[in-house]
Image (cartoon, rainbow, N blue to C red):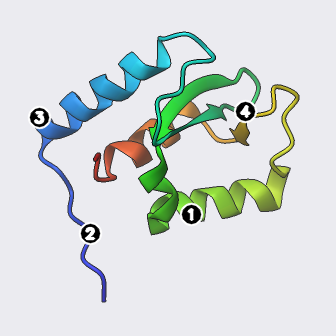
Amino acid sequence: MAIIRFPSFSSKTKNFSKLQGLCNGNKLDVPKGYLAVYVGEIQKTRFVVPLSFLEHPLFQDLLRRSEEEFGFDHPMGGLTICCQEDVFTDLISRLPFP
């Protein structure tokens, strides 16, 4: 049985601020160890997330569900996750930030 560690509120806020800062940079600037994903049902918002999120079961479940319903095809060439932004931000706020 796996144990999921939920960071404290202040830690989540600080980590989320780091993610937002990465998202506001140049569209071509994705730091080493990170991945750009496009999130949204109609209007897509770009997020830059650590590659380590790909190993987390919660993130993998979200990817699986998105692939089953919508596939991953996106004209901008990035990984697209068709879900509400607030659902995505809530999920990534629960994941350990490197």
Measured Cα–Cα span from mark 2 to mark 3: 18 Å
- Look at the numbered disc 1 and give the secondary structure of its residue: helix
- For badge 1, the amino acid type reads Gln
Circles 4 and 3, Cβ within 8 Å, touching? The answer is no
Left or right: 22 in relation to 83? left
Residue that appears at 83% across and 49% down: 70
Picture coordinates of residue 87 (x, y %)? 50, 41
Lower sequence index among marks 4 and 1 = 4
Q: Which mark is residue 60?
A: 1
- Look at the numbered disc 2 and give the secondary structure of its residue: loop
Q: Residue furthest front?
A: 32
Residue that appears at 62% across and 22% down: 45
Measured Cα–Cα span from mark 4 to mark 1: 18 Å
- For badge 3, the amino acid type reads Ser
Judging by the rendered image, the residue that carries numbered circle 2 is 4
Picture coordinates of residue 6 (x, y %)? 21, 57
Alpha-carbon neighbours of circle 1 within 10 Å: few (<14), some, or many (≥20)? few
